[in-house]
Image (cartoon, grey):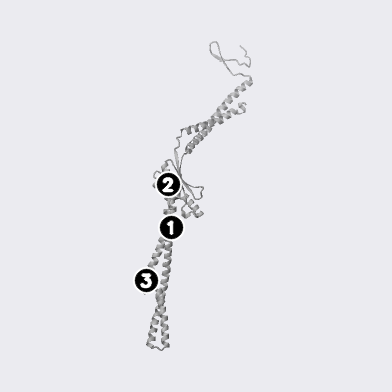
Amino acid sequence: MSARNGSTPLQVAVMILLPLLVTAAAAYIAFDNSPPAPEQYRATVVVGPPSTVQDSAAAVNLFIADLGQRITADAVVNHVLDEVPQLDQRTYIENISADRRETASSVALSFVHSDRAVAELTVDTVARQLLDGAARTDFERGQFMLDRATERLDAAEASMSRFAGTQSVFDPEVEYRTALDEIAQLDRQITTGQALSYSDAYTDELVARRDVLEASLPRIGQALLSYRALTAELEQAQAVWEEASLNYDRAEFEYQTVNAVDNLISNRELVAFVDTTPQLQRTALAGAVALALSLVTIVPLTAWLLRRRGKHRGLAEDLMDSGVQPTRLRPDSTGERHPAEPQGRSRRRA
């Protein structure tokens, strides 16, 4: 193909392959001279939910979701940084993760670090903090309910003590029933005395005693109503306290046994690996820069040189087509070089 009609396939191949070769060379040099990636350690702790949420699928899902959110909560982060001084907040947040395992109720807590001891200590600290918090929730709820029940019981007993101290009757139930019985007995005696014509003094005495008892009935009745209300509150407070006490004892036992942190950790794993991502990133960056520079400089320069070469080749072809040979220098007898006569036409001698 003539240069006048465009670039040859060889020229096109050169313009395409040259940038690729430059890019490959730059990438190889960058990869070969990159510092070797340090060995990393991924420490993993597989944990399960406490017994208080194992019977409910919704509770298990909530536990797992809460676990994934709490690994970066301020309280957990601050606790981990206090326990592992080699870490900073950014390193911890970027390398901690929580993934649900195939088993629906298992969660894998993982942490990656170049120091094996730091990786293991960090993930163990996180697991213990989260599991203790989850297991402690039921125990603390039981403690709270027991404290409220105790306060209610103390208040009911105090009210009953104040009532007993302000009343002249010891037991309103007994006093009221006794008063009614005495009134009924006096009515019978009065009826019998009137029927048998007892003396008026005897009958009047019985009537006076009955009137005194009847006058005391409203006071004793009001005391009885208050006493019954206080007794019902005291009994209810005692029942609530007994139930809260049983729940607290159960929660405390589970917290110290089945829900202890070590019993909620089902497995520990440690994997060593080399992360070549930074090295590959540097290599890719070097290759991209080399390709960009070659496209900006080498390709245009190569194209210009090829066009220039093609232009000279095209001129030579034109001269050959017109019958004119390129000028050659011929040495004379003195050794100097002079242009030779063109071969395409004759020259007249003077």
Decide which of tag 3 and tag 2 comes sooner along the chain: 2
* 185 and 32: which is toward the camera: 185
* Residue bearing mark 2: 124
Circle 1 sits in a helix, a strand or a loop, which is it? helix
| Kind of residue at badge 3 | Ala
User: Which label number is shown at residue 164?
Assistant: 3
The x, y position of residue 165, in whole percent, is: 35, 71
| Kind of residue at badge 1 | Arg
Q: Are marks 3 and 2 in contact (CB under 8 Å)?
A: no
| Kind of residue at badge 2 | Asp
Decide which of tag 1 and tag 2 comes sooner along the chain: 2
User: Which label number is shown at residue 250?
Assistant: 1
**What's the residue at 43%, 60% (across, down)?**
246
The answer to which image quadrant residue 190 occupies is bottom left
Please give left or right for residue 57 compared with residue 183 in the image.
right
Residue 253, visible in the rendered structure: yes
Q: How many marks?
A: 3
**158 in relation to 72, above or below:** below
Decide which of tag 1 and tag 3 comes sooner along the chain: 3
Circle 2 sits in a helix, a strand or a loop, which is it? helix
